[in-house]
Amino acid sequence: MDPLDEALEQPARTPARTALSFELIPPRHDADEAKLKDLVSGLAAYKPDYIAVTSSRRSGWLEGTADFIARLTESTNLPTIAHLACTAGTEEELADWIRRLIDSGVRGFLALRGDLPEGETSLPEGYLQYATQLLTLIQEIEEENAYRLAAGKLALSVACYPSGHAESPTPDLDLDVLLSKQRLGADFAITQLFFAAEDYLQFAEQSRMAGVRIPLIPGIMPMTSLKRVERMGVLSGIEVPQTVVDALSSASTPEEEYEAGMQLTVELTQKLLDAGVGGLHIYTHNNLAVTEDLLSRLGIEKPTN
Ligand code: FAD
């Protein structure tokens, strides 16, 4: 057979499956144990590529993150990524936390600056000022631990902003910052939430043109109520588009509001998948039912093997 015909006869390669990861928030001390177990086992059933655990003042910064990761590691075999923010402590304190988290089995970090305290323009002396500095610190500690890390590598991720970062004077600065994160060793970036697929697609295109090659994984926030959407808009410094406000506020019951919001979320996410985006990062807000509903509407089921 002519080699060309033979090549054409080859069956097409199965496309890679959509990568999937979940963001979880460390539970409060009085959280319902049974619900928590259901959440973890329900999410684990999707065999996600990793679970990312946030850190915040509310959960005692890394205290809560580390405890929850220890628990996830005990009860599942899922890889975990710890969110680590410069705001959580001095450089020395962060270095200790990185060592402790590596000891407890963490093999990846999301390196963040964190939000500045109200009215401040920088962090106190002794604190790292930018996520890029934290990337460097993590890699220094990775080097100290090279003998212990299987392939000598931690997964390093960073944040990026399809709708711009609230403090950035221009989108160009956001791109420059993302490029330096790539240059300083970030393996992938997870986006802040956004309200229109076009915002992500344009941002991804502009990033590629600027030389960004790492995956930019879209962070998907299920829009389940106007109150939640507005609160998340304020927390992330993004204005909620009038179309979203109109769609959610025209509902006359909470069920209708949920349905309208879910439809918007599914439309947005489906547009990304149709455009060839290879992975989704779901902001679960620890809500299993909402996460399952969203994934099911997108045709993403729990793998059976
Ligand atoms: P940076 O990348 O350091 O950027 C901060 C600002 O400084 C930007 O405006 C940037 O343009 C500018 N900048 C950066 N480098 C320089 C430089 N060298 N010179 C001048 N300007 C510069 N926060 C938490 O507290 N806990 C969490 O768990 C958490 N999880 C998150 C998860 C995701 C996926 C995302 C997108 C955000 C998360 N955040 C979290 C919020 C994040 O901490 C804030 O958005 C914060 O305001 C910026 O963090 P960053 O890592 O992007 O900062």
Image (cartoon, helix red, strand yellow):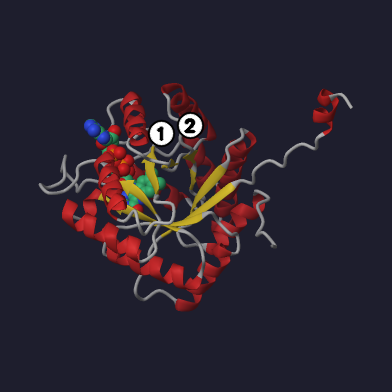
Mark toward the start of the polypeptide (2 vs 1):
1
Give the amino acid type for the residue marked by disc 2 in the picture: Asp
Q: Say which mark, if any, is on residue 199.
A: 2
CA separation in Å, label 2 and label 1: 6 Å
Q: Residue 196 in the image: state x and y as whole percent.
A: 51, 35
Q: Residue 303 shows which numbered tag?
A: none
Q: Position of residue 145 (x, y in %)?
A: 31, 56
Q: Hey, what amino acid is under mark 1?
A: Ser
Nearer to us in this view, 264 or 52: 52
Q: Which residue is mark 1?
A: 163
| Disc 1 element | loop
Q: What residue appears at the point 51 percent right and 52 percent down from the top-left corner?
A: 21
Does the image show residue 122? yes
**Left or right: 223 in relation to 179:** right
Question: Residue at horizontal 30%, vertical 27%?
Answer: 173
Q: Is residue 214 left or right of residue 41?
A: left
Circle 2: element type: helix
Image point 22% across, 46% down: which residue?
Answer: 116
**How many numbered badges does the structure rendering display?**
2
Quadrant of the rendered image containing residue 290: bottom right
> Do the residues under discs 2 and 1 have CB atoms within 8 angstroms?
yes
Disc 2 within 8 angstroms of ligand 1 (CB): no
